[in-house]
Image (cartoon, helix red, strand yellow):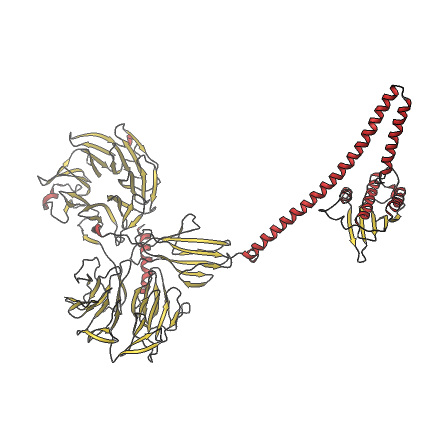
Amino acid sequence: MLSLLCISFLSEANNVSSIKTLSNVNKILQDKDGFIWLAGQQGLTRFDANSNVTFSLSNQEWPMPYSWIHNMSLIDDKLLLATETHGLWLFHTQTGTVKKIPVDIPKQNHFDAVMFKDEYYINVPDKLYRYNPSTTETIVIESNISIDHLVHNQEHLYIANEEGLFQLQDNRLVNILNEPITALKALTNAVIAITANNIYRFSDDGTISSIKHDETIYGLTKAFDSDDFFTVNKKNTISKYNGLSLAKIPHHYGQSKTLRIRDMFHDASGVLWLVSNQGVEQVNEDYITNHEVIFDIPINANEIKFFDNEIIIGSYGAGLQNFLKPVFKQSVNTGFTKKGLKIFDAIEVDKSLYIASLDGLWRYDKNQGKVTKLNIIADQLVLKLRHKNNLLYIATNYDGLYIYDLASEKMINHVDVNNGLLSPEIIDVLTLNNGTVWIANSRHISIYQQTTNVLTTINSPNKSKVVSFVLVDNKIFASTLGDGILVFNQQGDLLAQLYKDHSFTEMIVINGDVWVSGQPGLYRISAKNYQVTMIENTQQYSFVSSMLVKDDTLYAIHYSGILALDLSEQKQFNPNVIISKTTISGKAKLLNKSIEIDSGNDVITLDLASLDFRPGLAKKYQYRINNSQWQQISNNQLTLTGLASGHYNVEIMATNSLGHWSDVIAYTEIDVAYPWYWTIELKIFYIIIALFTVLLTSWLLFLRTKSIKNIHSLLKDDMKNCGRIMKTIQRNLQLTSTSLASNEIEHSKQLIEKSLVMLKESLDSQEPDSLSGKELSVAIPFLADYVQNKYEVKLHCTLDDKIDSLKYELRSDIYKVIFEALISGIFKSDVKNFKLTLQEVKKKLWLSINSDSDSFNQLNSRINFDLASYTIRQITNKHHASMNTFENDDGSSQLVISFPLMTLD
């Protein structure tokens, strides 16, 4: 585990090494997004704590018309670049594009440039120019002047050189200090000028103040979030000053390693950047003081405890030792046995110090100033001591847990494997107010009820040893040597497992948070949301066990000493989380805007950055799409491909250098284009077509329903008419029967004759619409005579001589088709002549009816049809026949129906 964490720290450090070796950097600054920019002979470099991008003449991927940059300044989201060979340029930090500023200056080697009150001021060798972009006018402000520094605030512009400090007043430079200036920096409403012996503050209102200093100062920069400022002298000492009073301010930066600083910058994460010909150095705040504590013992694994309100050390081989103040006499350890000098734990009770050692239990009496071995338990290894309600809980390595009553000086309980412990090794004990005792016995956690003498071992996911317990927010936190932190409720139910696969040792509760020592690093855990944060600059230490707090300082012991951490200075930094680079199918661009791709086959790679430049843990990243579940990312790149057509909202979270999730969330949108046949325009077209189809179908169904309804009406009328005639005849026959019974012969004859006449008239009025048992060779000529006599339409027939050998059912249906087709054609057109052909060809009976008018065009319609169309279609479907109608150019038409059959006999 130590090796894995070291690799993480090393990889983070390697990311910075590439910029540390840049030896020709002239200027450094931070833009509004949080990126660090370095300008020099290498070109322009952007650093995001993971990687860097360099724009230069030699970089084909990120090209620039030049490489050597003397200076730069920030103007909103642009950088003003003063170059050695190509004059003055504006660089857009969002797009990576550059634009030349058309100043009228003969020389192209510009040393410094700033924008002050919407005008550019340019330092060219021996001259100071001003360029107005509105009028495109370039004028010389001062000639024959050497400029070492060019700065400005909201009200004034300043230059400095060996002759002193100058302020721009009414388009001319006025000397306001006649001393050589070694460093110059503008504040919000003042300027700080440093000379060989003094630090001056020139306020915009004309007030001048100064203080003395002892060493030559080369580095000067303003604090990121205030007008305080930092300096670095030739002895590499970093100092911080109040920007108003010039009073020194305590800080937590150590010594720098850089000589003759060219530039200095303080970023948002609190890192001081120092630029020199030796490269780029980062100096970080260090709230930690390491007290080296090493004894002449084989293993420097010691414990720190409180005794008499002072911190003392229980060593593993050197007995009791003092720490910051003397508590014990040098002779105190003479009373220990050799094994007794190896101390595992100690606890103060009523001005006595009880000591757990390799040789049992000992007690130090303050009044006597010596140690005494207690014969409470046998001579065995005691690992942990706990005290509550005048009871001393003694955790042993081989014999379980002893509970000793200090008042009665009696052993009142002993919990071991006979009570159900799975191991006799007791590493830690936590006693609750309700009398419940939590026991860490090797790799298991047991809960012991003292009142009922019942012990229960809970189910926990750890396979490594449980080291320490704390109670906070009604929850039990348990640290392990390899399985992270386990969180339980007081009933023993697992609530969470934090930082799985990490090793932790001792825990302590400070202001409602859990602080835990790890191997390596110190961590703070929120008891509310389980957020785990590594403490800055502790990752190089591997901690043994105990921690304690004294005077708002946390003390934690490690293998080479004791770390003191000032708790009052700890604050949370939420870095900007940003997409630093977007690559779409091999084409890269800076930052990120809404992404539009043609298809899901395009590969989108998002380079992610958490702009925290402090050293620490490797940053973690996670993302989610369209408010789905958060997904972890294995590194700082998110690659997306195979996206379906549509719109996607992508959110990205990242940790800072201490492992805390930043409150800032990066965001982007991805639009995957639909295929050409599924564009918005075509979707509208499809909707219109669908609506039109629905409307047309509805209309056709309406017409069809109307046609069917008409047919039903006709059939109903026929049935009604036939039924009326039959009922009349039935009534006449009944009356006849009655008359005969009454011997009314004459009246009966009249009724019978009346019925016969009615029946004859009904038969005579019927059309020949059925075969009625006749042959086709007879019925069709009869039909021809009928249509000619009644409708004056001629029918010419050509019949196969074998048609009467067909089955009667087929002949009857064929006749029905002929009749319906002729009558329908007569009523639907102005036909004068029909020509009918009925013959067998190739196992099919072909019925062909030719008309000299358009008589059959309605027969194919399945929407607007009549009874004739319906009848013909039903018959053709019945015999699997095919029906076709044709219209000729001369206005005539033809109906052709083929009936499949066997060869006629």
Image-quadrant location for residue 677: bottom right
> From what the image shows, is residue 162 above or below residue 581?
below
Residue 168 horizontal side relative to residue 63, left or right: left
Residue 488 horizontal side relative to residue 710, left or right: left
Work out whether residue 671 or residue 328 is closer to the camera in this orientation and state it.
Answer: 671
Work out whether residue 693 or residue 181 is closer to the camera in this orientation and state it.
Answer: 693
- The C terminus - image quarter: top right
| Residue 304 x %, y % | 19, 45
> From what the image shows, is residue 18 above or below residue 371?
below
Q: State the residue at coordinates (80%, 32%).
A: 724
| Residue 150 x %, y % | 26, 72
Work out whether residue 844 or residue 4 is closer to the camera in this orientation and state it.
Answer: 844
Q: Is residue 212 visible?
A: no
> From what the image shows, is residue 796 above or below residue 727?
below
Q: State the residue at coordinates (31%, 32%).
A: 456
Residue 716 horizontal side relative to residue 83, left or right: right
Disc tally is 0
Q: Is residue 682 visible?
A: yes
| Residue 819 x %, y % | 83, 44
| Residue 179 x %, y % | 17, 73
In the displayed orientation, state which residue is furthest to the left: 368
Residue 635 horizontal side relative to residue 861, left or right: left
